[in-house]
Amino acid sequence: KGSLCTMAMAQPPPLDAFELVIALPAGLSEHEARVECRHEHDRQPASEDDQRLIEGIWTERVARNPHLFNGTKFRFAGVDALSSDAAAVTLRLGVTDYKSFLGTNCAEHWQRLIATSESHLASPLGCAAIVETADAHVVLIRRSGSVGECPNSIAMPGGHAEPEAVMVRSLEEWETLRSSDDSTIDASSTDWETNVRHEIWDSVMREVVEETGVPRESLQAPLCVGCSRRVLNHRPVLIFFIRCRLPGSAVVECYTTGVGVHRDESTELFTMEHEAFLRQVLDEESLPMPGCHKGGVMLYRQYLNRQQQQQPEQH
């Protein structure tokens, strides 16, 4: 994939600009969260020729890069919480696809779309993981030059949850669920939303394993510490904290020797002592990261601060 999300536009925001959609410094486990994945949270067309514009952008992109694949993604419509400690945190999701992402969030006119309504953007929900090693280092990768977003940047391991994992392989298939009585999926059922929730938490584990080579059994269950959004292209990412049982040197070895590592997505893996990492990213700003990930580092700091505050209470 080429660099599709950094196209020329009038006074675009800087790549590292971010906003925190929600902070969850206590950390949210899979079973504490609620997911609402429904058609009412899908993207809304901006005009009558909306789809034609998206198709035109897609045709142009595929002509440049025949390897592009139009997979389904979960669309981020928002998150509701009673408080930052809430057991009642609800993710509101729809379904979109990569084609719509390129044709809205990554299109030259994305700022005009959002000025009208966020509902006109595909806004697929990404995931990224702060992987902290046994010796208190953070795992980082350098993205390859061929990835679709933020090529050659330093980032955390991550990717997307996949609607295909819960039997939604296309937008057309998702649309049939509105009126189909014999569908195997009931988009309003508890089981459906439990499956979607599981896919979101499971996907970040898959991405870490695939991008680092660390065995799954060396990783503890993910905790969601919030949602960050890159201002450029209005790109939302759920941020997870994952503790790794291996030291940093062993993680680097896993990446170097791992058979199943997705080497087309990164060119390097390295680790940084977590205090130096926080300082360089947030205080000195000497380690540049894309905004959605830089916001994730801020959420990580808030999570660590919360853990430190609770330590005296545990004695």
Image: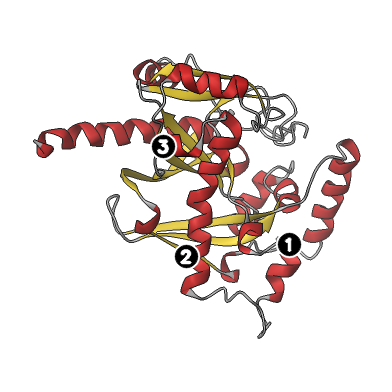
Q: Earlier in the sequence, mark 2 or mark 3?
A: 2
Q: Are marks 1 and 2 in contact (CB under 8 Å)?
A: no
* Secondary element type, mark 1: loop
Image disc number at residue 194? 2
Query: Can residue 17 be seen by looking at this rendering?
Result: no
Residue 242 image label: 3
Tag 3: amino acid = Ile
- Residue type marked 1: Ser
State the image coordinates of residue 115 (x, y, percent, origin top left).
Answer: 61, 50
241 or 252: nearer the viewer: 252
Q: Nearer the viewer, mark 1 or mark 2?
A: 2
Q: Amino acid at mark 2?
A: Thr
Q: Position of residue 315 (x, y in %)?
A: 8, 35
Task: Classify residue 13 by image quadrant.
Answer: top right
The dot on residue 237 is none
Distance from label 3 to label 1 (Cα)?
31 Å
Q: Is residue 97 above or below residue 309?
A: below
Left or right: 96, with 200 as reference point: right
The spot of residue 52 in percent (x, y) is 84, 58
**Which dot, 3 or 1, sits closer to the camera?**
3
Name the residue at 61% across, 50% down.
124
The quadrant of the rendering that contains the N terminus is top right
Q: Residue at x 88, y 48 (%)?
A: 59
Q: Which residue is mark 1?
A: 170
**Kind of element beneath mark 3:** strand
Instruction: Looking at the image, tell me whether mark 1 or mark 2 is earlier in sequence order.
Output: 1
